Image: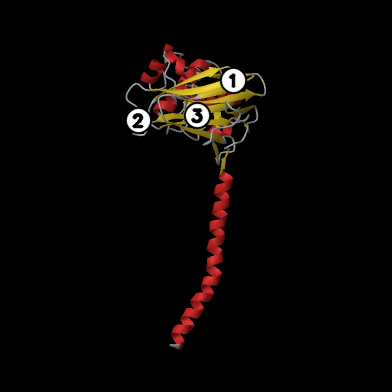
Amino acid sequence: MKKFILVLTIIAILASFINPTFAGVEKNMDAFKARGCKNFNGVNKVDFPEFSLKNIDGHLLDNSMSLSNKDFYNNELIIEEYLNSDKEKSLEYDIDFKSECKIIFPESVKEDGKLNNDGSYIIKSNNKNIGLITNLSAIDANGQNLKIVTKKIGNRIQHSFINEEEVIYPVKITVGISQVLAGNYYNYFSDGYWQHRTDGVSLSLYPRKTFYLDSTLEDAWSEVIYMHGSSPNWSNERGMYKQFKCHNMYAPNKRPWNLEPWRPNVSMSQTILAGCNP
């Protein structure tokens, strides 16, 4: 009996040391989560370095939140809205520019005269990318992905869905908006340099990731131009761009991506048929 009581006493003493430790870890995790996600319900606006966002009535949407991103260069604001009837077909917000800015479709969607945008946009100021509109989606209650049309009316951005088939409400529309800071090259590439090979000079790039959106692809390319465009080796920019895009689509895991200015500037389809090396 005495041994049993002694064992219980030892367990109680150990528990007094262990419990606060686990409680502290749990508290720290809660604090981390609180830092990582901020709800903007009732906030007048959210400021980015070159622009700010606000809703039509002066407030952001109830479900607006900022999701923490380990990537220093690309903190993202996620806006979500649930539409509950046929009378509600869009997510809208106002964007106020702090300098002369415009919102454009990425140039890549216009290859060969075809428009096939994935819903992403680039926010541009003084010929520099300052933000991206990404993560655009509309899903109904049955999990059906709906087509989205984006319009810019003055300073107002409108994302609306098209119900080509029967839609089951509510419909959840989501959009992500992120800033782009100058000197973003090493966010996209771990390394990049010119090298002389037997068949000619090549720009060898080591991308950190596949560029799934038109907007991120275009922003990464703008950083390539900024970093390497002043080299005497730089020429045939359009041809190199098509090689760059082809590698992203058909050889994303290859390292490095070799872009060669001496190759001919042919159409995108011919570049693809040639295995990105026309």
Q: Residue 18, percent across and down?
A: 53, 68
Residue 240 appears in the rendering: no
The amino acid beneath tag 3 is Thr
Q: Nearer the viewer, mark 3 or mark 1?
A: 1
Contact check, label 3 and label 1, Cβ < 8 Å: no
Q: Residue 97, percent across and down?
A: 64, 23
Which disc is residue 155 wearing?
1
The amino acid beneath tag 2 is Ile
Instruction: Give the left or right position of residue 168, taking residue 71 as reference.
Output: left
Residue 206 appears in the rendering: yes
Q: Residue 30, percent across and down?
A: 55, 52
Q: Is residue 67 above or below residue 195?
A: below
Q: Nearer the viewer, residue 211 or 99?
A: 99
Q: CA distance from mark 3 to mark 2?
A: 24 Å
Sequence order check: which comes first, mark 3 or mark 1?
3
Residue at the right extreme, as displayed: 99
Which disc is residue 168 wearing?
2
Residue at the bottom extreme, as displayed: 2
Which disc is residue 134 wearing?
3
Please give the name of the residue rendered at 51% of the width and 22% of the height, measured from the top-left corner: 158
Label 1 sits on a secondary structure element that is loop
Sequence order check: which comes first, mark 3 or mark 2?
3
Mark 2, residues whose alpha carbon is within 10 Å: few (<14), some, or many (≥20)? some
